[in-house]
Image (tube, grey):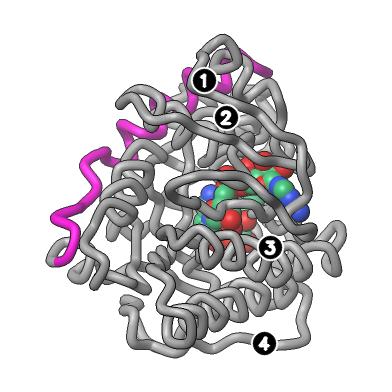
Amino acid sequence: MTGGAGFVGSHLCERLLDRGDEVVCVDNFYTGSRHNVYHLLDNPRFELVRHDVTFPLYVEVDQVYNLACPASPIHYQNDPVQTTKTSFLGAVNMLGLAKRLHIPILQASTSEVYGDPHVHPQQEDYWGNVNPIGIRSCYDEGKRCAETLFFDYHRQHRIEIKVARIFNTYGPRMHPNDGRVVSNFICQALRGQDITLYGDGSQTRSFCYVSDLVSGLIKLMDSDASVTGPINLGNPGEFTMIELANAVRELTGSSARLVQMPLPADDPRQRRPNIDRAREQLGWEPSVSLREGLAKTIAYFATVI
Ligand code: NAD
Ligand code: UDP
């Protein structure tokens, strides 16, 4: 698993080890951390390798989960050239690995491939509305190009591919300073600081709890070879940022004020996955409600900040 020491990756490592798999966790610790996988280091079936996926990797494995890539706007915009390289060269290198070993490979793609969508909710046959030269493009276009490479390796080299389009996911081990909305709102509420609404807070997102996402990723990897994706993995519940802020205030018992800040460039107006394909092809749908997931995430942040 590349990116295994990150937020999603650390949960995925844990779940695979729990069912008896061996895991080689590959990470350059750009946004992830050894702390996220400390508790796994004693497990003889777990191996941690420091490696940057923009360089080739030679290991002997049975499957590849390709998660390496900074995911929060603050992090991926900090070094945009490296972000594009990670998506593009990381995909080339990991697809090369899958080709040499004749093994299935899963790509952690993203709802960002839909950009600021004109089709709502988003289904997989929608091609998206993406700015190719904006500040989010290093991530969005990097992920879109990675999808292109996955499908070309599939058509040209018969590689078994699995492309997951992941919608906003949250839960314990999110980085407290990564600027994503769930971690920001919870940390602000717990610290008694103002809650920062970007724009008027009417934009929407759909939030998936991390344990649900991990189940979907494993089901996708274990699915029949004919299931290539792209396949949306997300929770179809749709909330405005004001609704999210109010839920966080209520669950933390905070009376923090909501303050408006400028809306970042190219911030999508709305996002909600159509998950019919995941239901039909994987028998998957999320089971953790936003309030339930927020309560668990708040309990986690209360211990770390
Ligand atoms: P994260 O930043 O916590 O994890 C990414 C991991 O990749 C980190 O451990 C980081 O150190 C590692 N990494 C980055 N560049 C690397 C490189 N060049 N070589 C090796 N490792 C590298 O983010 P996350 O939320 O866990 O996201 C995991 C994956 O899921 C990403 O590919 C992301 O694009 C995708 N995704 C996440 C979300 C979400 O809401 N969390 C939504 C859509 C897609
Ligand atoms: N957002 C916000 N306040 C914050 C952080 C984010 O209102 O402190 C908004 C942001 O503008 C976006 C939404 O929350 O409309 C989700 O942002 P995030 O960075 O979590 O994810 P993405 O935009 O990539 O979906």
Disc assigned to residue 90: 3
Bounds of the magenta segment = 281-305
Q: Earlier in the sequence, mark 2 or mark 4?
A: 4
Amino acid type assigned to the residue bearing label 4 in the image: Asn
Ligand 1 is within 8 Å of the C-beta of the residue at disc 2 = yes
The residue at which mark 2 appears reads as 173
Report if the CB atoms under discs 2 and 1 are less than 8 Å apart: yes
Q: Position of residue 104 (x, y in %)?
A: 41, 59
Q: Quadrant of the N terminus?
A: top right
The residue at which mark 4 appears reads as 131
Q: Quadrant of ligand 2?
A: bottom right
Amino acid type assigned to the residue bearing label 1 in the image: Tyr
Q: Decide which of 103, 169 is in the foreground and name it.
A: 103
**What secondary structure is marked by label 2?**
loop
Q: Position of residue 98 (x, y in %)?
A: 52, 61
Q: Earlier in the sequence, mark 2 or mark 3?
A: 3
The residue carrying pointer 1 sits among few (fewer than 14), some (14 to 19) or many (20 or more) residues within 10 Å by Cα, namely some
**What secondary structure is marked by label 1?**
helix
Q: Decide which of 294, 127 is in the foreground and name it.
A: 127
Q: Position of residue 251 (x, y in %)?
A: 41, 27
Vertical order, 77 against 65 (above or below) = below
The residue at which mark 1 appears reads as 300
Q: Indicate left or right for 3 with 30 as reference.
A: left
Q: Position of residue 193 (x, y in %)?
A: 70, 31
Q: Does residue 240 appear anywhere in the picture?
A: no
> Can residue 295 be found in the magenta stretch?
yes
Residue 16 sits in quarter: top left
Residue at 76 percent of width and 70 percent of height: 84
